[in-house]
Amino acid sequence: MSKEQYHAGNSLTLRLRKSDEGIMKWAGAQSEIGDSIRFLIEQEIQRNGFKDLSLEIKNKRPILPTSTDIEPNLLAYLYNRNEPVAINDAYEEMREMFEITEDEARITVRDGQEPQWKNNVRWASQQLNIKNFIRKDSQYGYWEISEDGKVYYEKTQNNITMQKEVAHKPI
C-alpha cells in the first residue's frame, strides 16, 4: 500500500466498524475529538518515532482460522452429519471447533458488515463447492456433502489413518 503524503489543512478520516464499540465510546467522551487524536499521535511519535504501526497491529491481532484451515474441518463435519446442515449450525460448529472467543468473533471484515470468521467459513464452503464436495442442489440455507465429497473424505481419512499406523508401527 502506498504511503500518502499529508499537508497542513488535510483531513484524516477514520471509518468505525460495528465492532469498534470501545473506540466509539471513547470518542463520544471527548470534548474535542481532533485535539484528543492529535495528542495521542504526538505521544506515539515521542515514544516510538515515525514507525508504521499497521505492521505491528497485524502481529498483535488475534489470528483467526483461514478458509484453508476451515475447509477440511467443514468437510469432516458435513461428512459426519450426513444430512443437510443449516448454514448457521455449521457456522457455530466451526466457531466451537476453532475455539473462537467473543472478542475474536467481533472482528469484522473491512466494511464492518460481517464477522471475519463467518466470512472465512463461507469461503471454505465456496472452495468445497468448487471441488464438487458440497451438493449444488441443496436447499437454500443448507449445506450437504456430495458423493464426491464423501469419497474424497474417506480416501483422505484412510491415508491419514495409514500414515498414523505406519508412524507408530514398532520396528
Image (spheres, helix red, strand yellow):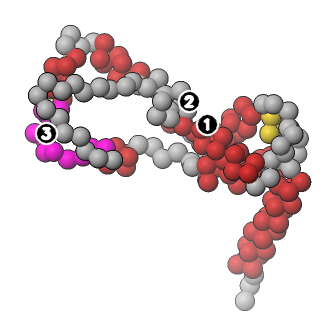
Asked whether 139 or 28 is in front, the reply is 139
Q: Main secondary structure of the magenta part?
A: helix
Q: What secondary structure is found at the residue carrying circle 3?
A: helix
Q: Reply above or below: 15 against 58.
A: above
**Residue on which the image places disc 3:** 45
Q: Any mark on residue 47, and which? A: none
Indicate which disc, 3 or 1, sits on the residue closer to the N terminus: 3
Label 3–label 1 contact, CB within 8 A: no
The residue drawn where x is 11% and y is 28% is 8
Residue 73 appears in the picture as rendered: no
Residue span colored magenta: 41-54
Q: Position of residue 113 (x, y in %)?
A: 53, 27
- Residue at position x 81%, y 61% in the image: 152
Residue picked out by circle 1: 118
x%, y% of residue 18?
Answer: 47, 23
**Local crowd size for mark 1, using a 10 Å CA cut-off: few (<14), some (14–19), many (≥20):** many
Say which residue label 2 marks.
114
Q: Which kind of residue does numbered mark 3 sit on?
A: Ile
Asked if one can make out residue 134 in the rendered structure from this viewpoint, the answer is yes
Residue 44 in percent (x, y) is at 17, 37
SS at badge 2: loop
**Amino acid of disc 2:** Glu
Q: Quadrant of the C terminus?
A: bottom right
